[in-house]
Amino acid sequence: MTGISAIRSALSSASASQQAIFALACAERTAIVFNRLAAPASMAVYKAVLDVAWDAVKTGTRIATERRQSLASLPEATIDDSHRRKFYATLAMGVLEHALDVMDTSGTQEAADLACCQSLDLYSCFDAIVQGTPSTIVDPANPPPSGPLELAEIAEQIEILRALTIGSEVGAAFCDQLRERAKSASQILDSAITTLFKGRN
Amino acid sequence: MAAQQECGRPWGAARQATPTRLRGLKPSAGSVRDDAPPTARFPQEGFATLTNGSRVELGKGNVAENGDIVVPGKGGKPGRTYPASAVARVETRDGQTAWRRTPHTPISISKPTAQSPATSSQESPRDVRSDATVPKGREAPRGPIAPRVPNATNTPLTPQAADVPEGGFATLENGSRVAFGPGAVSENGDIVVPGKGGKPGRTIPASKIVRVETPDGRHSWRRPPKGNTGGSPSSMATIAPDAGPIPSTKAAKPSRVQSRQEQREAARARIAAAETELRRLNAGLSQNADIRNNGLTGQPPNSRVAVDQYPSDVAAAHRSENPNGYSDDNLGTVDGGDDYNPTKKAIRGESEGGGDTPKDNFPELRSDPVVSVPRAALPSGSFEEAAALQSRAKALHDTRGAKQGTTSVMGVQNRLTGERQTWVAIDSDQLTIPRRWQGQLLPHERFIGGPGHAEQKILSNLGDEWYVVSGGTSVNICKETCMPLLQQHGLQLGGPLFKTSTSRNTGYRMFWGLK
């Protein structure tokens, strides 16, 4: 079973709260992109929403609509030009949006899958940036292998799901541990973002 | 997150929202355009003929903004003002340009607007065209296929750079079409096309140009009929039957209404055919419920009016380009040759040789370095195919779950083998196929990975072998990067106008090759 298949399989049998934690961990691992590329004022809002989301997961409460609106009002929410480096902050924001969807909607598995895939795509994106590979034609029947950053993210997602499913109880302390783990795992994107800084503004 | 995806808008809504051609534009001296009578923009010296038959010599700037003629006094004598209502005709000293009160102009239908000085209580030579209420169904045509037809009485004699600030297309006397970029139109109306790949550029004299239009077809210049170029009084007073963009209700003829009805019916049939192809195209996509339900426009089923209101001018123009007409079986048949239905065949995964008659009338548009490569066939693209590909782009984009960004899908053909493929790209740098698409792309589809805008990276991978037939994008095409690139590849933007949230984007999401 490939990495993504294993993740999807595990997600399908996970509870709604486990799916929410998984998706939030994905958002946490991509938050570094936002923090490095977005405007400082936006970073504060982003962190506040992420904090609220983690608190909501711990306490089983809902996230206030205003929080989501504050995220939507950020300038990074509407950047669609990939020639701008802030575009990648927008992509990272999408992962958090899907994570919030997991907590807000009944279709949690679909939203969790979107968070998973968007996170993998973002890591794959930085693989390409680091490698500096020019654009190429990819035959879906013979796709290129995943890069090291994407592989690391796959491994991390599997590990989070394993921890969630074997853990006896998902408490506040456990959530904090997972969040810290996600933060440190995201540090591998640091050099990739620095590479991005060189080429775009 | 605020939705950056720009929502679709039916043609009818677009026309009502931006009736640029209908509004009275704020007059400014210096040019004579068909959206304002020349009296208010008459910077030259000339003559005015009053309604009582007397003639008044005009100096520069004597025509006021409201159309009144103000002749300054000489030698300390007071000047004199002739009210616009008393002016019957204005002409330049050399007779090249003139305005003449249209005898049958229905003054009474004028409706006051804030932007129209012609709506003052004083009757003005600034005629009422720009303020007229447009009867439903007789709105000015929009879109790239049917550019406006300027009024023969005040059309500039040469193309104007201001009309095409972003470049566009010029149609020459010999029928060929030339794409040009921003600033290519010189002061004298000549179009200077820079050379590519070290080759010298060329200048197309204004005298050879019969028509100029912007890429979106909304602004165009058409050479006035020869009878008008000399400025003869009789020709200046002549208004071509189809020249008025806002014909009055009285002018409506049953035959034209009937013709429009037929065109609308044809457009409906073509849309239905495109939707059929779209369903087939999406057959392999597991999560395409949205597109199946929403159809071409991205609107809910009960908003089918958007499709029904598809402009008949598009259908008419296509019919003229494809005299064989469109049907499910002969879609885009070229010269009665092999059946060319790229979408339908590509869906079936068929790869076939050309067989079409190579008939490339526009070498300047097919500017790829392919001199040594024989072309199996270069059929033009089609609106139907572009519509299906745009819908595919939107469906794939929605599947990806991306809140932002672009997904572009283009039908491409190999010049050597005639093989057709569909190339898909997103505007992220990733080289791997998006995770949500894995196992979802069809056998003939290829993913283009790497840096750049989605359209940009597809075009950069064409090389010598491939060219784009048609394509579409999930969001509006950007003006700065992608629109010029598409035009360089002989593709014209068209189709429905979508609402745009930024001036950096066009209103278009579809494009197809010219023939």
Image: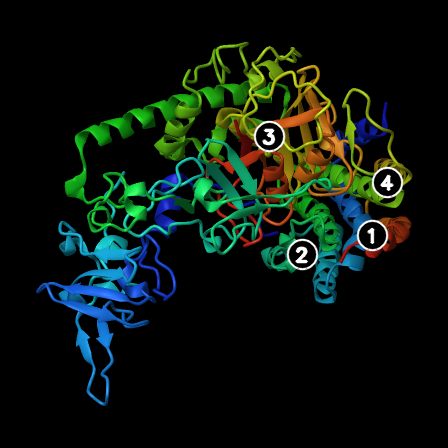
- Determine the residue positioned at 41% across, 46% down: B221
**Mark 2 secondary-structure assignment:** helix
Q: Are marks 4 and 2 in contact (CB under 8 Å)?
A: no
Specify the label residue A196 is tagged with.
1
Specify the label residue B363 is tagged with.
3
* Quarter of the figure with residue B291: top right
Please name the residue that numbered disc 4 is placed on.
A153
Residue B264 location in percent, x, y? Answer: 33, 28
**Mark 1 secondary-structure assignment:** helix
Specify the label residue A76 is tagged with.
2
Alpha carbon distance from label 2 to label 3 = 43 Å
Callout 2: residue from which chain? Answer: A
**Lower position in the chain sequence, tag 2 or tag 1:** 2
Residue count near mark 1 (Cα–Cα under 10 Å), binned few <14, some 14–19, many ≥20: some
Mark closer to the observer (4, 2): 2
Q: Are marks 2 and 1 in contact (CB under 8 Å)?
A: no
